[in-house]
Image (tube, helix red, strand yellow):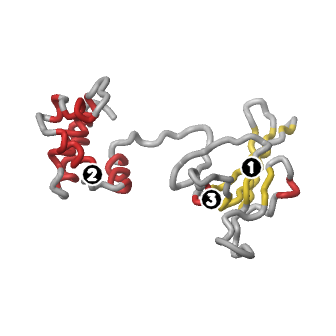
Amino acid sequence: MGASALPEFRNRVYHLLHLYNWADGITDLIDALSSAERVQSVVELSLQAAFRGRHYSGLYKAIRYFPLRDTHLMALFADFLPPPRRRPFRLLAERETNVVVRVRGNRVFFCPPGNARAARGHPRWYGERFALDDPATWPQPDAEETREKTDHRGHRLVVHLQAWRGMQMRGSRQWPMHRCPFTLFRVWAPLRRGK
């Protein structure tokens, strides 16, 4: 965001917070957080000039009563993001988070559990095992696509894509990963010589 757009962005945040009667305290906290250097405690943060002499208990209240949800903030940020640029590649990502991660070829994931229930105890969290290095464990993909293109050297490139939805990875009590399903993509492109 350019410096010229910053005052407008700050005013939009302020007016949005004003609807909830917490505009002054929260805006001061945002200013204090943005300008603070080497602050190591809440009290030190409350002593920042941008917090305008408010008591440190006001800082706790500003955090506790912050009314804006992620959807409010994303809609606000969207107006200030630079327009998308056309690039020579396509990015495959989940719509909700826009995160793409490359994984090792020996990882093991799990298919969705479906409607099958365990004989005893809580419902099953994981389905059948899906080992990346064992194609015999792979079910039919939920989506497949093949595209062809010719690179700058005249080599024909055939790109294959497969996708499995609702995949899961093993978690723990601290990190219950069964609650975070994802789409697994397989992309491969054997190079063929000639035109």
State the residue lying farthest toward the top.
Answer: 38
Tell me if label 1 and label 2 are in contact, CB under 8 Å: no
Classify mark 3: helix, strand or loop: helix
Pointer 3 residue:
178
Q: Return the residue nearer the eye: 71 or 106.
A: 106
Residue at left offset 12%, top offset 34%: 52
Residue at left offset 59%, top offset 54%: 173
Q: Return the residue nearer the eye: 85 or 137.
A: 137
- Residue 111 lies, with reference to residue 66, above or below; the image says below
Q: Where's the N terminus, which quadrant?
A: top left
Amino acid type of the residue tagged 3 in the rendering = His
Can you give x and y, in whole percent of width and height, for residue 154 in the image?
Answer: 79, 33
Q: How many marks?
A: 3
Where residue 87 is drawn, which disc sits there? none
How far is mark 1 from mark 2, CA to CA? 44 Å
Which of discs 3 and 1 lies nearer the camera? The answer is 3
Marks 3 and 2, the one that precedes in the sequence? 2
Pointer 1 residue:
186
Marks 3 and 1, the one that precedes in the sequence? 3
